[in-house]
Amino acid sequence: MNQLALDLSEGRRRKREGQRLVASHNSEWMAQALDDLRVFAAERGEFVVEAFRARRKLLHKPEPTSAAAWGAFTRAAQVAGIIKWAGRYTQASSAKTHAHPVKVWSKA
């Protein structure tokens, strides 16, 4: 029986590499979405990225080439000092997310 290799540092390295790759394939989308997030975050106290995604969809804004880009986007927004984690989680509202926990964010 094969045992699953658990290596947290390798997992983190792969996550960073995946985010870098998806961000590079969506750089134009990412720049526009970050600009939109600055406005969105300034208008709210706390929010989930899911609400930002819904708002963009309502406004017929372009989507990234991959849903994985949203993770890279959230990290980029945090690194850019646009948002900060509010220190808590809530349940996702989207039916597709099956009510899993999502981070609550606020303007940085």
Image (cartoon, grey):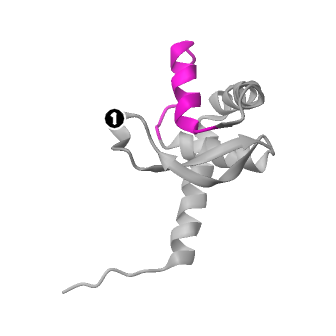
Image quadrant holding the N terminus, namely bottom left
Q: Is 48 covered by the magenta stretch?
A: yes
Residue 99, x across and y down, in percent: 38, 44
Picture quadrant of residue 44 = top right
Query: Of all residues shown, which one is farthest toward the left?
Result: 1
Q: Quick check: can you spot residue 68?
A: yes
Image location of residue 37, percent across then percent down? 70, 30
Q: Residue at x 66, y 49 (%)?
A: 75
Q: What x and y, as percent, mark residue 92?
A: 45, 41
Q: Which residue is mark 1?
A: 95
What residue span does the magenta drawing correspond to?
47-67
Asked which quadrant contains residue 3, the reply is: bottom left
Camera-nearest residue between 17 and 43: 43
- Tell me which amino acid carries mark 1: Ala
Q: Residue furthest top?
A: 59
Q: Residue at x 51, y 19 (%)?
A: 57
